[in-house]
Image (spheres, rainbow, N blue to C red):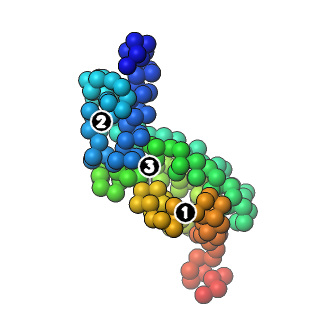
Amino acid sequence: MSASRRRDAPATRAAILDAARVLFSTEGLDRVTLRDIAAEAGVDPAMVIRYFGSKDGLFDEAARFDLRLPDLSGVTPDELGPALLPHLFEVWENNAGFLALLRAATTNRSAADKMLDLFVEQVAPALARAAVDRPGERAALLGSQVLGMVLSRYVLRVPPLVRMDRDELGAWLTPVIRYYLTSPAPGAPDDPA
């Protein structure tokens, strides 16, 4: 650890957060210790406690982020996938905090509650802007499909999903997004079934 890092509290705090996000996303909340995080950040474990109080406090901070989803109001049904997917791929592939939260949500009630809050506060309102009706149901159905794919590709690492590039996976996901947000609801007068 350099002398400048020891004296720079914001840099030390940021290094701890970065290390926590990486380790939580790759190893999971339950497997990672404060010592692991401290070693990854190049600090004494006491520094982690000093800045975050506990592993739970650190996870709470590491799993907090703004998805910054695009505004989908006025986007045509055929453009929903292309408008949404590039942003989502960036979150899934370049936001260790999101993957840490997703991984932890499968086994930890507090993390699952944080994931639900993220859906309720950020995802559902963004998707509701594009839904033709029943926005809550449509957002929940689409969210369940997308989270299942993200869990399968980025956490479980199901080989066929991992082998697909963004364009191929996007081609599969685009009609799903369009269907859930804009197709007639089952039993509706326009439902072709």
The picture quadrant where one finds residue 193 is bottom right
Picture residue at 42% right of the left edge, 28% below the top: 15
Q: Which numbered disc flags the more N-terminal residue, 3 or 1?
A: 3
Instruction: Read off the residue under disc 1.
Output: 163
Picture residue at 27% right of the left edge, 27% below the top: 45
Mark 2, mark 1: which one is toward the viewer?
A: 1
Mark 3, mark 1: which one is toward the viewer?
A: 1
Quadrant of the rendering where the N terminus is positioned: top left
- The amino acid pointed to by label 2 is Asp
- Are the two marked residues, 2 and 1, in contact with CB atoms closer than 8 angstroms? no
Residue 47 or 138: which is nearer the viewer? 47
Instruction: Read off the residue under disc 3.
Output: 99
- The amino acid pointed to by label 1 is Arg
Residue 80 or 33: which is nearer the viewer? 33
What distance separates the C-alpha of mark 2 from that of mark 1? 31 Å
Picture residue at 61% right of the left edge, 69% below the top: 172
Residue 97 or 192: which is nearer the viewer? 97
Percent across and percent down for residue 152 are: 45, 63
- Are the two marked residues, 3 and 1, in contact with CB atoms closer than 8 angstroms? no
Mark 1 nearby-residue class (10 Å; few <14, some 14–19, many ≥20): few
Picture residue at 42% right of the left edge, 40% below the top: 22
Q: Which numbered disc flags the more N-terminal residue, 2 or 1?
A: 2
User: How many badges with numbers are in the image?
Assistant: 3
Instruction: Read off the residue under disc 2.
Output: 36
Q: Which numbered disc flags the more N-terminal residue, 3 or 2?
A: 2
Mark 2 nearby-residue class (10 Å; few <14, some 14–19, many ≥20): some
